[in-house]
Image (tube, rainbow, N blue to C red):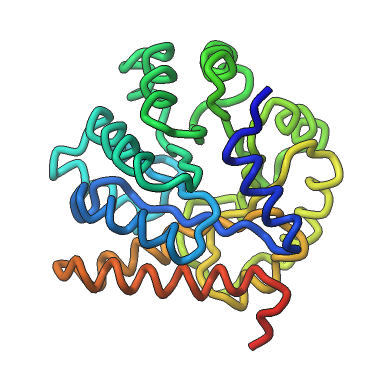
Amino acid sequence: MKESRINKAFSHCQERGEAAFIPFITAGDPDINTTYEICLKMAEMGADIIELGMPFSDPLADGPTIQASSQRALTRGINTEMILSLVSRLRSVTQCPIVLMGYYNPILQYGLKQFAKDAKEAGADGTIIPDLPLEESGQWQKEADKIGLSNIFLVAPNTPMDRVEKISRKSRGFLYYVSVTGITGARQELPKELVDGLKKVKKVSPVPVSVGFGISRPDQVRQLREYADGIIVGSAIIKIVEKNNPSKKLIVDEIGNFVKEMKKATTNSYAS
């Protein structure tokens, strides 16, 4: 089987002794063309995988920052077809892996088989669907596997280890470890139990483990880089969009600088 772009990204990072850095951005916030520019800048500045959020009106896993971002994108009329077109434009100029993060209902409405086909043809590499539990994922998993789209599952600190093991065996590309039992959002302090949780999950997972939710600073990345294969950051990036809107150039430049700094923190050579 052909090695996926996601697998290659993790292999590359492992060879270099660093964690993968995975920034999240909501598609269409502040607009679809700026999202395009942001994604290219993130790839240029060291993003190993890009998580592209598909805005939804009831994003249960997301905190206020990403909820507001989704609402702004929806207000501008962003829909699934526009996002897939964006992925296609990006794929024509970058090989950085792209993972679509979205909720199940819009994908179900689009049609599982059709969505898998269109996402793959556009150049997407995987999906994260936070409200799709393992027990209800069979049909989607079948369509995704058939076409070579990695379906990435999430586990939380309160997920029993036997269930973590079961879920990790079904996850493709990587396993998403949620750092807190709550919603997304930048936090001043990470949970004290986080490192122990990551160690336990990595012991049973046959795929790389990436951690997300609450991470927003280079020092937090340095805390986690030895224990996680990948580090996911979303709300801190969305805040840069909020802060610098309507200057699109400033948004792109500031996010580029942030990604560069966070990627540096995933490497052992970064000591400051």
The quarter holding residue 158 reads: top right
Task: Please report the residue visible at 72 percent of the width from the left and 67 percent of the height from the top.
Answer: 192
Q: Position of residue 86 (x, y in %)?
A: 28, 39
The residue sitting at the front extreme is 93
240 vs 60, nearest the viewer: 240
Quarter of the figure that contains the C terminus: bottom right
Task: Please report the residue visible at 26 percent of the width from the left and 33 percent of the height from the top.
Answer: 85
Q: Position of residue 196 (x, y in %)?
A: 81, 59
Quarter of the figure that contains the N terminus: top right
16 vs 272, nearest the viewer: 16
Above or below 210: residue 85: above
Q: Position of residue 135 (x, y in %)?
A: 63, 18
Task: Please report the residue visible at 44 percent of the width from the left and 25 percent of the height from the top.
Answer: 120
The residue sitting at the right extreme is 203
| Number of callouts | 0
The quarter holding residue 194 reads: bottom right
The residue sitting at the bottom extreme is 272
The quarter holding residue 123 reads: top left
Above or below 10: residue 260: below
* Left or right of residue 33: residue 93: right
Above or below 235: residue 88: above
Task: Please report the residue visible at 65 percent of the width from the left and 45 percent of the height from the top.
Answer: 156
* Left or right of residue 248: residue 50: right
Q: Position of residue 47 (x, y in %)?
A: 50, 58
Asked whether residue 186 is in view, the answer is yes
Asked whether residue 157 is in view, the answer is no
Above or below 113: residue 248: below
